[in-house]
Structure formats: structure tokens, C-alpha cells
Image: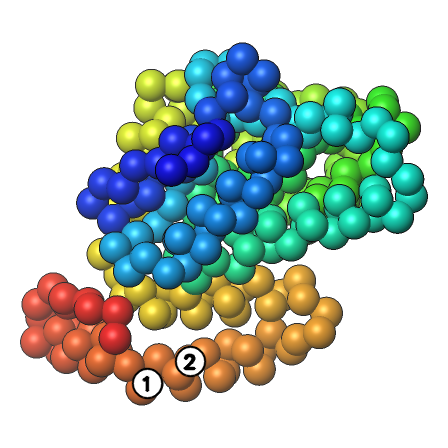
Amino acid sequence: MYQTLLTTLDNGIYTITINRPDKLNALNRDVMAELNVVMDEVYQNAAIRSVIITGAGPKAFVAGADISEFTGLAVEEGAQLAAKGQAIFAKIENSPKPVVACVNGFALGGGCELAMSCHFRLASDNAKFGQPEVNLGLIPGYGGTQRLVQLIGKGRAMELLMSASMIDAATALQFGLVNYVVSQEELLPKAVSILDLINSKAPLAIAKCIESANAVFDETKNGYNVEAQAFGYCFGTEDKTEGTTAFLEKRKAIFTGK
């Protein structure tokens, strides 16, 4: 179905693997277009409960954008390219189902931006993160300047953005960019164990957690209002009735996502 992506659905967890290992999984037009389509599938397919995004091969998650596609672009075309990329990554960030990045190797430029658009990140011990765009006379265009500041703070983000320095997995963990660092062999199993736990919870409540937490960084919204409305919404769900009843009856809740 996809030319640049491999997809598998196992026990509610949908694994999306960017599959251009000979190009270190660089983001070209085809990859971006297919990421856009595959996220529509995530939104619409009820069998998908949560998502892992990773890269093929042991060397790279995504080593950046395909720079050959940048040559010859005029100012307006560059802005349009960035806007299109931002819209695709916003679709990942705002997914009502959890999306976890499993970073196996290089996550540079657009690859780091892709990882940051996911709800949280796990890294293998050989992972490297960076925004090297200033080396090309450019800046991150797919939301990197915004999300890096959100995730690691302004001072550290400014240094990485302006120096184009790479950080290793241990530093990324210290900075709060990733939640865990594990061996390459443990990377996907660790993500699966976390998502199995999340998938056992009420799906509509999970979606509202994502929506409410994302509102923190959306200047058009009052996050407290979003939270209050989401809290109220949950009271109209069958899952809330099941969850509270199960708690009072001292049994395990069985959530249906209704």
C-alpha cells in the first residue's frame, strides 16, 4: 500500500516504519505525503489504538529532510513547503490516539522534528538528536523551533538551534527530550509494554488527555477551559460509568471506547 513506509498492526498497536534505510530514512516528498495519508488511517481505523513511529535499519530514525528537494525553491515555495510539513506533523501531535517515537540512531533536522511531534519519545543508546539546519543557511521549518523550546527549555533549545550541535541519547534523557534510553533490542518491546498499558485505559479519556495537554502550548486556547470541557465530556461516556462502577465493585474495568 505504501512505497516508503512499512506498517503492521498487532494487538491494537500500529507500527509505522519509515523505510528508506539506504538514504538513512530521509524525509522526501513521498515520505511526507505517505505520513499524511497514514495518519488519516490512524484517525479513522477503530482497530488502531496507539502508534509507534520508527525508522528502518540500525543507523537512523530519520537523518533529515532530502536536501536535494530544496534546491531552486523561491521564498514563497520554501514557506509553502514548511507550512505543508507543519500541517502533517500537527496531525501527528493532535492524534487522538497516542503516538510514540522510537528513535533508533540519527534523528536530525526533519527527523528530530518528526520525533518531537510525537506524544513522547524513547531512544536507543546509539540515538543522536540535532537541528543542523543553520549549517545549510536554513532553520527548522516543520515546527522544530517551537517544539524544541517546549520540550527542553529556551536556553538549551537556543544553543542547539544556533550551534547545530548534536546531542547523544544520555543527554537527550537528561534534557527531558526522551522518556527512556534502552538498547536497540529493547527499544520496540519497551514502547509496546508502555502502549499495552495505555491501551488498557479508556480510549476517549486518553484522547482528552492528549487534547488538554496540547492546549498548554496553543495560544488560541485556554488550557484550563479545554480541560474542564473535556472532564465534563467524559461524564457522558459509557467508559466513565464502567470505570467508576468497576472501581467501586473492586474489579478490573472493561473499556469499549464509547
174 vs 194: above or below: above
Foreground residue, 243 or 95?
95
Q: Taking the image as drawn, is residue 214 in sight?
A: yes
Residue 237, quarter of the rendered image: bottom left
Name the mark on residue 137.
none
Residue type marked 1: Phe
Front residue of 130 and 171: 130
Please indicate, yes or no, whether residue 198 appears anywhere in the rendered image: no
Residue receiving disc 2: 231
Q: Where is residue 30 in the image (x, y as percent from the top left)?
A: 58, 35
Residue drawn at 46 percent across, 31 percent down: 3
| Quadrant of the frame with the N terminus | top left
Element under disc 1: loop
Q: Is 95 left or right of 130, judged from the image as shown?
A: left
Mark 2, Cα crowd under 10 Å, few <14 / some 14-19 / many 20+, is some
> Measured from the top left, where is residue 111 in percent x and y?
61, 32
Mark 2 residue element: helix
Q: Distance between the residues labelled 1 and 2?
A: 7 Å
Relative horizontal placement of residue 211, taking residue 80 as reference (left or right): left
Q: In this view, does 51 lie above or below 188?
A: below
* Residue 2 relative to residue 217: left or right: left
* Residue at image point 84% right, 44% down: 77
Q: Residue at the location (57% across, 43% down)?
A: 33
Question: Relative to 149, is 176 on the left or the right?
Answer: left
Residue picked out by circle 1: 235
The amino acid type found where label 2 is placed reads: Phe
Q: In this view, does 75 lie above or below 134?
A: below
Q: Are marks 1 and 2 in contact (CB under 8 Å)?
A: yes
